[in-house]
């Protein structure tokens, strides 16, 4: 699942006419980077959720897309804006899409640049065989989030620590594997038929407290393209 429903308020005015995942980074729309990386790992059945300017995504991507050297991607959509008039936040959007997803599935953000991250069948198989309900890729805290999001134990358990505490050394990259069972107790029925908005972070923290979230550190290039300045830096560095 490729998350693409957000408004991108901090990116205005760039996002007034173009959804943030379709802004260009190093020669192509930002969301192409994770979509291509998933396809290189063999994950060619991809679902995109939409809300703000949602009609632009099927117009741009269609139902199939083929890039040179990458297996053809088959695309489905979850149109939150069309169905409910608004985005459903991350967890609400995932629960809405659950009927279209496998028992174990990736979630990536369409507005994060992580060109070196590899999506492997081995990672999915290890996670599927584990007791964890979610597996997160974490990055060392960037300058824009010095207090961090989570800690990580020596045994690979993601820890729910207070922001800014000594062990809160990592920021959630937004890339993760989930089992459908992770969302079983979220309070929403599968498919989220009423279109209830629901945040993901509280669900993750509750699962961490039960020891059900594993993780690993990604040390490669990573940018949360959240501001025009970060977008300009990315494009400037490609010159």
Image (spheres, rainbow, N blue to C red):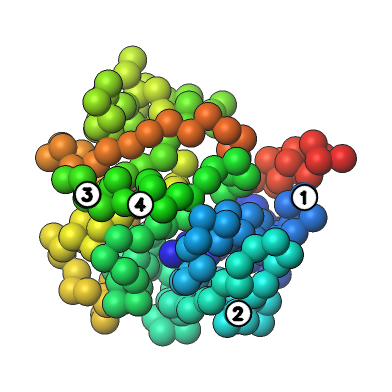
Cα–Cα span, label 2 and label 4 = 24 Å
Q: Identify the residue at the far top of this view.
A: 166
User: Looking at the image, is mark 2 or mark 4 nearer the viewer?
Assistant: 4
* Residue of label 2: 64
> Which class describes the residues within 10 Å of circle 4: few (<14), some (14-19), or many (20+)?
some
Q: Residue 70: percent from the left, percent from the top?
A: 65, 63
Q: Earlier in the sequence, mark 2 or mark 3?
A: 2
**Quarter of the image that includes the C terminus:** top right
**Left or right, residue 51 beside residue 84:** right
Q: Which mark is residue 8?
A: none
Q: Element type at marker 1?
A: loop
Cα–Cα span, label 3 and label 4 = 9 Å
**Quarter of the image that includes the N terminus:** bottom left
User: Looking at the image, is mark 1 or mark 2 nearer the viewer?
Assistant: 2
Q: Which mark is residue 129?
A: 3
Q: Residue 23: percent from the left, percent from the top?
A: 70, 59
Q: Earlier in the sequence, mark 1 or mark 4?
A: 1
Task: Examine the image and state in which quarter residue 211 appears.
Answer: top left
Cα–Cα span, label 3 and label 1 = 37 Å
Q: Are marks 2 and 4 in contact (CB under 8 Å)?
A: no
Task: Examine the image and state in which quarter residue 35 appears.
Answer: bottom right
> Which class describes the residues within 10 Å of circle 1: few (<14), some (14-19), or many (20+)?
some
Q: Earlier in the sequence, mark 2 or mark 4?
A: 2
Q: Element type at marker 2?
A: strand
Q: Residue 123: percent from the left, percent from the top?
A: 38, 46
């Amino acid at each position: 699942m490729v998350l693409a429903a957000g408004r991108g308020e901090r990116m205005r005015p760039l996002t007034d006419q173009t959804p943030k995942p379709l802004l260009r980074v190093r020669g192509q729309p930002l969301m192409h980077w994770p979509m291509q990386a998933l396809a290189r790992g063999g994950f060619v059945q991809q679902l995109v959720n939409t809300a703000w300017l949602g009609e632009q995504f099927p117009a741009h991507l269609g139902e199939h897309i083929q890039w040179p050297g990458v297996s053809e991607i088959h695309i489905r959509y979850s149109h939150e804006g069309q169905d409910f008039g608004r985005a459903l936040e991350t967890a609400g959007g995932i629960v809405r899409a659950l009927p279209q997803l496998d028992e174990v599935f990736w979630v990536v953000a369409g507005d994060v640049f992580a060109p070196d991250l590899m999506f492997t069948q081995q990672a999915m198989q290890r996670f599927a065989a584990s007791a964890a309900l979610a597996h997160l890729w974490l990055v060392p805290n960037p300058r824009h989030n010095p207090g961090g999001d989570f800690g990580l134990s020596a045994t690979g358990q993601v820890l729910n620590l207070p922001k800014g505490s000594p062990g809160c050394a990592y920021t959630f990259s937004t890339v993760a594997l989930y089992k459908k069972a992770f969302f079983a107790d979220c309070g929403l029925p599968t498919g989220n038929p009423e279109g209830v908005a629901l945040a993901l972070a509280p669900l993750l923290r509750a699962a961490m407290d039960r020891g059900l979230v594993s993780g690993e550190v990604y040390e490669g290039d990573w940018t949360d393209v959240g501001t025009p300045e970060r977008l300009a830096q990315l494009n400037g560095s490609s010159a």
